[in-house]
Amino acid sequence: MYQYKLSDNINPQENINIFRYSTSSSDYEHTHEFFEIVFIASGSGVHNVGGVSYPVERGDVLFIDFDQMHAFSSDTQMTIVNCLLDPVFIGKELMNAENAIDILTLSAYVEFSTKVRRFVPKVIFRGKELLKLISLFESMLEEFEEKSIGYKTAIQGYLQVLLTYIFRRMREEGDERTTLLPHKVASDMLRDLEASFFGKISLNELAAKYSYNASYLSRIFKACYGKSPMAFIHEKRVDEAIRLLRETDLKVEEIGRQVGYGEKKQFYKIFKQYTGLTPSRMRDARNKMTTLK
């Protein structure tokens, strides 16, 4: 998968890049080494985040986190304003952040944090709010393109206003939807996990589905069930592997594949971690018990 590099897309003397472009085609899935704010200025399309698709249209603002897999597609002309941010443009706190959205809300906007500490695929602006946002992006573009004295300071100020508008709207949307109560999210997530124990499971896909970032979703699940989603999955897979080892003559590698581990090494590692034995040793123990009988 292609990754857009920080050094190729943002001038280190500026730590920010703002540009407008139009497209009527689809791009390929990619990630990048910077934080991105995307404003849909006109048109409509689809934004795919971690395998989950969201319709987007004029007035939508999207957050693209570091290393977040995503792609845009559109059958009509869509105009987009992109704001690419090196973490240092916001502050030192973001330099080693795993999740830019969490740090943005917690460091610069503590007052909003109780409502927006989650991954949000898009924030919707309409009416007068949209007009204010358009004016703000136009001012940022003008400052960046003309590069007059003090332009970086001006852009930083505009960006603070932009983030305030965005977090206000996120909070309003959270109030409107009551943000799905954590226990309800955990319950729905448990159902999804139980339906796909032995298949390919991506925490990022589940996070996108429930509009939370992956780390926060994991904390919600652990608070409700006492273990992380991945620990829950591994336990269920190991339980099934034990059953198959005891009740069938399938090869160990085949059992590993059936319970969701494509690689033998990973299967052995997880199995021993949870049982204290390798799959082969457990089967040997079963065979000895059978012989004694």
Image (cartoon, grey):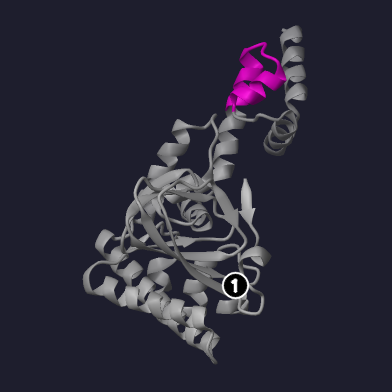
- Residues rendered magenta in the picture: 240-259
Give the residue displayed 62% in from the left and 49% down from the top.
Answer: 2
Return the residue nearer the eye: 293 or 243: 243
Q: Which quadrant of the figure contains the N terminus?
A: top right
Question: Alpha-carbon neighbours of circle 1 within 10 Å: few (<14), some, or many (≥20)?
Answer: many
* The quadrant where residue 181 appears: bottom left
Tell whether position 243 is magenta: yes
Report the side of 81 relative to 181 (left or right): right
Pick the quarter of the image with the C terminus: top right
In the rendered image, which residue does mark 1 sit on?
87
Instruction: Locate residue 189 relative to residue 204 in the image: left or right.
Output: left
Location of residue 274 in the rendering, given as x and y in whole percent from the top left corner:
67, 37
Q: Is residue 78 magenta?
A: no
Residue 84, above or below 76: below
Amino acid marked by disc 1: Pro
Placement of 98 over or under 259, stated as above or below: below
Q: Name the residue at 28% across, 71% down.
A: 130
The picture places residue 24, in percent across and down from the top left corner, at: 40, 50
Q: Is residue 228 above or below residue 274?
A: below
Query: Residue 229's spot in the image, x, y percent?
Result: 53, 45
Most foreground residue, 291 or 246: 246
Magenta span: chief secondary structure: helix
Position of 126 with respect to 197 (left or right) is left
